Image: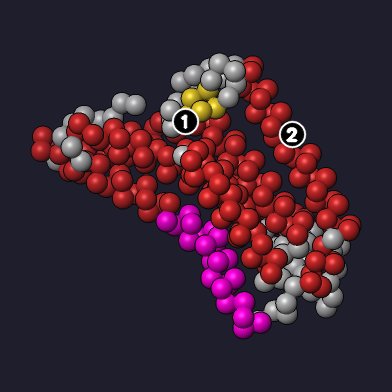
Amino acid sequence: MLAPDNSPSSSGYFAQLALVGKFMVGRLVRRPQTAPDAASRQRLWRELLLLGAIGLGTILVLMVAFDAYEIGLMPPRGTPSLWPVRIITEFGQDEYVLGLLAAGVVVTILIAPLWPEATRSRLLNFATHVQYVFFALLTSLLAAQALKYIIGRGRPFVGGKANAFNFDPFNGTPAYFSMPSAHAVTAFALAFAVAAIWPRLRIAMFIYAVLIALSRLVLLAHHPSDVVAGAVVGLAGAMLVRYWFAARRLGFRLGKDGRIVPR
């Protein structure tokens, strides 16, 4: 990947900062550098359709056969011994994760003009990876917020009882923002994105995502089908953003067999 090669000493730090910022943003909206072939498009849509079909089937089964029952298995809300679970669930808070990623991108851009030119491209490569993770989460969460509003599913015990079919579409209040779980969206989008860049972290990120999803059930914040829906949205969003980056040769490339692999 090419990087701006002007040095701060010759044009000034702020001129270099503007150049780096323009460079980083411009790549995201440029035309694809690699023409997406039929194999890559077909592979993406097959994966998305399979994910959607499995997810929808699982959601329907859980809603009919397990959601209400699972709520009865969980400890009451506010149980003091659940404090470790409350700590775990905070690691899936979308504002915290997005804020941390945004800060990572900003910091790398701010220090890039001060970085030695010989290794500056490595720093900008790292920033590209962080950008991918950020946009994978942001895209997934925006889709999730729209779905929450449209679906309008009540959280457990909203209305006074464990009712898995308590829906009030377009209600717009947090009590009816149960499906999909934003924590599950964040956890699974983050897990997919990080594993796509650093495959060796795949198992660790899968464990992280499952723990966040389970924490939402134990705290009676969501039904099981809510976290499955969140996982589907998070994975789908991260997959679509990865395809966008790969077509522009940003952190990924499109293989001849349609696979997307890290650069």
Above or below, comparing residue 119 to residue 64 in the picture: above
> Dot 2, how many residues are within 10 Å of its Cα: few (below 14), some (14-19), or many (20+)?
few
Q: Secondary structure at mark 1?
A: strand
Could you say where residue 175 lies in the image, as x and y percent from the top left?
Answer: 72, 69
Using residue 95 as the reference point, say whether residue 130 is left or right of it. left
Residue annotated with mark 1? 262
Query: What residue do we see at 64% from left, 16% from top?
Result: 38
Residue in the picture at 53% in, 22% down: 254
**Stretch in magenta:** 79-100
Q: CA distance from mark 2 to mark 1?
A: 23 Å
Please name whichever residue, 29 or 203, is drawn nearer the observer in this view of the structure.
203
Q: Main secondary structure of the magenta part?
A: helix
Q: Quadrant of the N terminus?
A: top left
Q: Position of residue 46 (x, y in %)?
A: 71, 28
Q: Are marks 2 and 1 in contact (CB under 8 Å)?
A: no
Q: Is residue 173 found left or right of 205 in the rendered image?
A: right
Quarter residue 183 falls in: bottom right
Q: Earlier in the sequence, mark 2 or mark 1?
A: 2
Residue situated in front as seen by the camera: 260 or 206: 206
Q: Is residue 249 above or below residue 22?
A: above
Check if residue 196 falls in the magenta segment. no
The residue at which mark 2 appears reads as 49
Frontmost residue, 198 versus 67: 198
